[in-house]
Image (spheres, coloured by chain):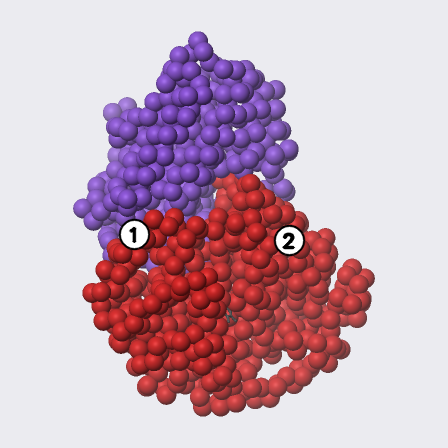
């Protein structure tokens, strides 16, 4: 059995008593013969994929015990690494036969615990499906396998004067499949849109084991928009194995400005003005002083000292358009107390600024071993108000909070830093997070703009949706996955505990209950 | 029999919800979401009835007692305007024209360009492509929030006055383009865009006016499609483009929407003039550039091809990537069925419409050729844009072959979101 040492703290909503849910800082040991899969089942997987690509050694499984949300860990029972869509389909069909859950996983950079097999079963790593199959520059699209890393695709299409617009800060590691599953955003999504706006077609292994194409190069559909429904479904509607994505022409001219403000409210005021002016920047990012200093210490970009906030503002387009926008941007900024305004004078400087921005998470690592990141979106006019609340929360709960976020979208990212070894701090971190989240919902915000709900925010869903609304939303899962095997226990608040559910499901499987009853009674969905 | 059922339903409903028209037919005009929910819940208890959202067009055909129109005419209030956020929240009975009128004093409008008479309800049902799709995105991308009712009258919502959202499943994707089969919208938040400092909306007559000197059609087509590609590359402020030909008027035309700062639009207009002159120099006759806004609006309205109740025998929507669409236009330019069709192409949206008025034409075999070429050989998709009349459809169109999984999913969608079968044919 999994040896669970009593928990020092428990994140709100993550069910107590769950065998596989436990908070960082707690050790778990697993032995091969305590997996939920029988030897025959493991052998069947080995036969399908080859011995090398079925991992069940505890020390190897540990690699997969969490994603970038360091609050929750759940080592998988077994990890499989398929190379082809047929292999993925075979694994899913076997899971159907055995009635055990399966969980897709990309690079594991997810920030909401989405890739954790908390209900046990098979973790399907897509990383070997990493080929860029086609770049069609004429039609401005690419066909890729879903284990392709976001940045690789961009590297590949750059010579054709094109880029793949969704650019999460984790793009050097995260996969296109993970981006699709989370509907990932990024710095330039303000102008170019999020993942769902760039996916034309998806090859999907359905939870029932079929292989189908949703959409296609044409990007059209017959009365049901399967593609947009699937994007953002966090692996709960099936596994994406290939994607046809749109490519965008690299703009003729790009200019990045750095504006430093002595007061946060001045910076957020400028954000609102820039948006209201209709200037249409391609990126508009907010970095607070704490983060700017951490980043500067790590990347030496020369962020100004003593400013409460920095905005990175990017304008792109035809050179004449950029020139015109620059004039207008400067006019707006003049009406605020800007302590420093400069711009990247060349491509290298521009990239350095963005690398620094994208490296904020790494920079926090120099201060504290881990951080807990929220991802609410609020109306942009509420930024000043909510940032003030965040500041108060930091001081009330005695925690360090760094703010670095997509201000143009109103997509906050308060990073609450913590030391997993300090259980008292952990408790404060979790509470602080909850207060911030409630404040965001209070101003008409939503729980997540790009990181998804996963496991970590599932228990907040009933603060945004009523029971009927949640039930109506849940039905969509049932459409694709009536057995509830695809990435269970995610997105929706668990009726019972995730581990409890798992346990009883397994008991039911052992008892040989019919599928229908299992599905209806055990509440995997 | 069904008339009696309808009368029972009318009696069971709160006063004022059911109306009777001059021909004694019953229709419904809810004034608020709660009334619509009551209608759905009550009507669900009477089997055999279908509620048909009135998309703002007269329902001319198919008047049957079992199909009961629901009008959104009284669900057309503005809920909130957040001009500073570039968002507007309205009830879906509102028309594009009304929304743009509300937005105009704030120098804003909807980004997607549709005829003024279109209701938001119809746009949600159909997810129509539009001229400006290349610059602002699809209609679905404009919707940031929605409140709706399932076929059983249960309320649900997704998003709101936020421009980005991944909180749970994308319920907007479930509703937009689904022809109201899985739910009825009651409140929608849409993105708006600033009205540019300078705009030029133009119509170019691409075909020589002197028809006697007409070059062969394939040559003409290949020139045009390439010219359009060049034009797109050359204009920096181009927001939208469409290429079309109506049989009733002469030749191919091009609609262009340019907008931006004055000093960026003006050079584009000079480039455009030069492009037209170059075209003139090459072909006989005149290529006209019509800059009258009214001409643009006239054509925009005429190109509203997915409008229900129009008397066309067949309207096909052909979705193809740009290069394949060019191949289609050039390759089929001499085909009789192509010659008999009205054609509209939104290159940026990857959508082409073909429309025929002639009874019983094109023939089934020709339609089969189109579907085969598009779907089997060129990664495209052919759909029926409106219900066909008097046309012998091949199976490939009448019952398109789809993966078995889709059939299961569609079935479950109807079962779960419209258990009483009120919003479409029973499952
Ligand atoms: C430092 C840092 C910065 C980040 N910045 C951003 C940012 O700017 N914007 C942003 O949006 N996110 C950001 N993220 C979050 C994360 O990188 C994204 O959510 C990313 O899309 C996850 O991709 P992945 O391959 O790592 O997926 P994983 O973490 O492996 O999985 C994420 C979810 O997707 C599912 N999944 C994975 N692959 C598939 C597939 N092929 N088919 C179906 N489901 C699948 C999993 O089951 C899981 O639910 C950041 C993370 C870190 C650590």
Confirm whether residue A416 shows in the render. no
CA distance for labels 2 and 1 = 38 Å
Residue A181 against residue B209 in the figure, above or below: below
Question: Quick check: A337 left or right of A28?
Answer: left
Check disc 2 and report its element: helix, strand or loop.
strand
Instruction: Give the camera-side residue of A93 and A350.
Output: A350
Q: Are marks 2 and 1 on the same chain?
A: yes
Left-right relation of A158 to B179: right
Tell me, for residue A324, which label it has, or none: 1
Query: Dot 2: within a 10 Å radius of its alpha carbon, few (fewer than 14), some, or many (20 or more) residues?
Result: some
Between A321 and B379, the one nearer to me in the picture: A321
Lower sequence index among marks 2 and 1 = 2
Q: Which chain is purple?
A: B
- x%, y% of residue A323? 32, 53
Secondary structure, mark 1, is: helix
Ligand 1 within 8 Å, label 1 CB: no
**Is residue A183 shown above or below A438?**
above
The answer to whether residue A125 is visible is yes
For disc 2, the marked residue is A132
In the rendered view, does B370 fall on the left or right side of B232? right
Q: Residues within 10 Å of mark 1 (few under 14, many from 20)?
A: some
Q: Tell me, what hue is chain A?
A: red
Q: State the mark number for residue B161.
A: none
**x, y (%) of residue A329?**
28, 59
Q: Residue at x 70, y 76 (%)?
A: A60
Query: In screen coordinates, is A398 left or right of A327?
Result: right
Task: Please state the chain letter of the residue tagged with numbered disc 1 in the rendered image.
Answer: A
Q: Residue at x 49, y 60 (%)?
A: A167
Q: Nearer the viewer, residue B67 or A80?
A: A80
At x 58% / y 86%, what residue is drawn? Answer: A26
- Disc 2 is attached to a residue of which chain? A
């Amino acid at each position: 059995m999994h040896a669970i040492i009593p928990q020092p703290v428990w994140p709100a909503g993550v069910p107590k008593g769950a065998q596989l849910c436990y908070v960082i800082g707690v050790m778990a040991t697993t032995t091969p013969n305590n997996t939920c899969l029988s030897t025959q089942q493991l052998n069947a997987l080995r036969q399908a994929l080859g011995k090398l690509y079925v991992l069940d050694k505890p020390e190897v499984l540990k690699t997969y015990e969490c994603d970038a949300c360091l609050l929750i860990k759940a080592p998988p029972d077994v990890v499989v690494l398929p190379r082809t869509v047929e292999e993925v389909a075979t694994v899913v069909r076997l899971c159907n036969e055995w009635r055990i859950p399966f969980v897709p996983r990309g690079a594991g950079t997810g920030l909401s615990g989405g890739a954790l097999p908390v209900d046990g079963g098979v973790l399907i790593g897509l990383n070997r499906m990493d080929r860029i199959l086609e770049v069609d520059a004429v039609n401005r699209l690419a066909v890729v396998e879903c284990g392709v890393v976001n940045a690789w695709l961009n590297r590949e299409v750059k010579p054709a004067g094109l880029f793949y617009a969704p650019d999460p800060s984790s793009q050097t590691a995260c996969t296109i499949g993970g981006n699709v599953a989370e509907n990932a955003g990024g710095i330039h999504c303000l102008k170019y849109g999020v993942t769902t706006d760039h996916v034309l077609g998806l090859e999907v292994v359905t939870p029932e084991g079929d292989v189908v194409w949703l959409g296609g190069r044409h990007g059209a559909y017959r009365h049901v928009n399967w593609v947009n429904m699937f994007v953002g479904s966090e692996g709960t509607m099936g596994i994406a194995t290939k994607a046809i994505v749109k490519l965008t022409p690299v703009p003729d001219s790009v200019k990045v400005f750095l504006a430093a403000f002595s007061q946060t409210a001045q910076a957020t005021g400028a954000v609102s003005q820039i948006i209201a002016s209709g200037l249409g920047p391609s990126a508009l990012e907010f970095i607070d002083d704490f983060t700017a200093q951490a980043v500067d210490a790590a990347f030496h970009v020369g962020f100004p000292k003593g400013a409460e906030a920095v905005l990175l503002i990017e304008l792109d387009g035809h050179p004449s358009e950029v020139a015109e926008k620059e004039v207008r941007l400067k006019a707006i900024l003049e009406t605020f107390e800007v302590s420093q305004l400069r711009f990247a004078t060349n491509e290298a400087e521009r990239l350095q600024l963005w690398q620094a921005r994208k490296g904020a998470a790494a920079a926090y690592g120099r201060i504290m071993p881990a951080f807990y990141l929220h991802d609410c979106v609020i109306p942009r006019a509420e930024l000043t108000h909510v940032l003030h609340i965040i500041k108060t929360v930091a001081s009330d709960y005695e925690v360090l909070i760094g703010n670095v976020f997509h201000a143009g979208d109103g997509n906050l990212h308060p990073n609450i830093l913590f030391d997993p070894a300090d259980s008292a701090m952990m408790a404060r971190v979790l509470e602080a997070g909850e207060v911030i989240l409630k404040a965001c919902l209070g101003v008409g915000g939503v729980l997540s703009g790009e990181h998804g709900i996963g496991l970590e925010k599932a228990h907040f869903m009933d603060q945004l949706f009523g029971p009927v609304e949640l039930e109506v939303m849940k039905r969509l899962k049932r459409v694709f996955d009536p057995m509830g095997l695809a990435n269970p226990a995610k997105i929706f608040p668990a009726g019972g505990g995730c581990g409890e559910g798992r346990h009883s499901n397994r008991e039911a499987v052992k008892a040989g209950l019919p599928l229908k009853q299992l599905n209806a009674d055990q509440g995997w969905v | 029999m069904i008339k009696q059922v309808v009368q029972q339903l009318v009696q069971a409903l709160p006063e004022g919800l059911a109306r009777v028209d001059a021909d004694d037919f019953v229709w419904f005009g809810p004034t608020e979401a709660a009334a619509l929910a009551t209608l759905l819940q009550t009507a669900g208890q009477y089997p055999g009835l279908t509620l048909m959202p009135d998309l703002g067009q007269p329902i001319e055909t198919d008047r049957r007692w079992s199909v009961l129109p629901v009008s959104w005419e009284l669900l057309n209030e503005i809920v909130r305007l957040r001009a500073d956020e570039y968002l507007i929240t309205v009830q879906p009975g509102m028309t594009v024209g009304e929304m743009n009128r509300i937005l105009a004093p704030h120098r804003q409008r909807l980004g997607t360009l549709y005829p003024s008479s279109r209701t938001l309800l119809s746009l949600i049902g159909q997810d129509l492509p539009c001229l400006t799709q290349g610059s602002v995105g699809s209609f679905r991308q404009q919707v940031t929030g929605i409140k709706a009712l399932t076929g059983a009258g249960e309320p649900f919502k997704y998003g709101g006055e936020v421009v980005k959202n991944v909180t749970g499943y994308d319920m907007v994707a479930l509703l937009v383009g689904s022809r109201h089969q899985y739910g009825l919208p009651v409140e929608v938040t849409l993105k708006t865009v600033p009205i540019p400092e300078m705009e030029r909306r133009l119509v170019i007559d691409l075909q020589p006016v002197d028809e006697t000197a007409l070059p062969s059609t394939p040559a003409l087509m290949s020139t045009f499609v390439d010219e359009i590609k060049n034009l797109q590359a050359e204009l920096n402020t181009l927001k939208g483009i469409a290429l079309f030909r109506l049989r009733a008027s002469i030749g191919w035309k091009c609609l262009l929407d340019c907008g931006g700062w004055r000093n960026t639009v003006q050079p584009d207009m000079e480039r455009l003039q030069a492009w037209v002159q170059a075209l003139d120099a090459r072909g006989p006759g005149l290529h006209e550039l019509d800059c009258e806004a009214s001409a643009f609006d006239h054509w925009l309205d005429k190109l509203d091809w997915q409008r229900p109740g129009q008397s066309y025998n067949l309207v096909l929507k052909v979705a193809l990537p740009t290069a394949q669409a060019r191949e289609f236009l050039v390759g089929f330019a001499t085909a009789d069925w192509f010659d008999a069709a009205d054609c509209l192409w939104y290159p940026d949206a990857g959508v082409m419409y073909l429309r025929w008025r002639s009874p019983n034409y094109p023939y089934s075999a020709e339609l089969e050729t189109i579907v085969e070429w598009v779907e089997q050989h060129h990664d495209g998709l052919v759909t029926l844009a409106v219900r066909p009349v008097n046309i012998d459809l091949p199976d490939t169109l009448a019952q398109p072959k789809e993966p078995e999984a889709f059939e299961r999913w569609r079935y479950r969608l109807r079962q779960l979101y419209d258990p009483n079968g009120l919003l479409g044919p029973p499952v």
